[in-house]
Amino acid sequence: MDQNQPIEVKYTICGQGGCLADMEANDAFINGMKGGKTLLVQMINHMGRTVNITFPLNDFGKSYDGPPVDPKEIQAQKKALDNAVQNEAKETLKRIQEQNKKQ
């Protein structure tokens, strides 16, 4: 987190899809995330290369301490997003078909 020392986490299990690591997020870790700016997760891929993924922590404390999200609200948001993506795909296909007719 930020400029803190890295925490080494050992793999707990590996399979065809990859490996999983497990660690306890104790109070010190959570409080660090609440006050931190970024969380860097570093891993080694199947080719032996280092992969870094940075997560912003700007709103972590607000989200962690805030009220839980209603699963029905998440489902409604997902459905709305799915519909928007489908509508955009239909519009794109329609534009392509119209362009093909003009040629």
Image (tube, rainbow, N blue to C red):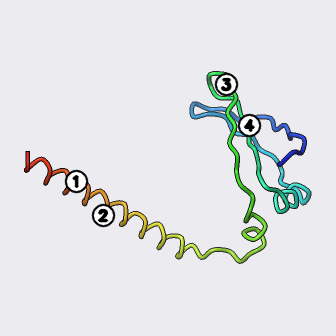
Residue beneath the point at 86% across and 40% down? 6
**Residue 84: percent from the left, percent from the top?**
37, 65
| Earlier residue among tags 4 and 1 | 4
Q: Are marks 4 and 1 in contact (CB under 8 Å)?
A: no
Position of residue 23 in the picture relative to residue 46 (left or right): right
Q: Answer with the quarter of the image where residue 25 lies.
A: bottom right
**Residue 21: percent from the left, percent from the top?**
74, 40
Label 2 Cα neighbours within 10 Å, binned few <14 / some 14-19 / many ≥20: few
Residue beneath the point at 70% across and 35% down? 13
Q: Element under label 1?
A: helix
Identify the amino acid type marked 1. Answer: Leu
The residue where tag 2 is placed is 87
Q: Return the residue nearer the eye: 90 or 65.
A: 90
Identify the amino acid type marked 3. Answer: Arg
Q: Are marks 3 and 4 in contact (CB under 8 Å)?
A: no
Position of residue 30 in the picture relative to residue 86 (left or right): right
In the rendering, which numbered label is found on residue 49?
3
Q: Element under label 3?
A: loop
The residue where tag 1 is placed is 93
The residue where tag 4 is placed is 42
Instruction: Tell me if residue 6 comes above or below residue 74 in the rendering.
Output: above
Q: Element under label 4?
A: strand
Q: State the CA–CA distance, disc 3 to disc 2.
A: 39 Å
**Residue 51: percent from the left, percent from the top?**
67, 33
Identify the amino acid type marked 2. Answer: Asn
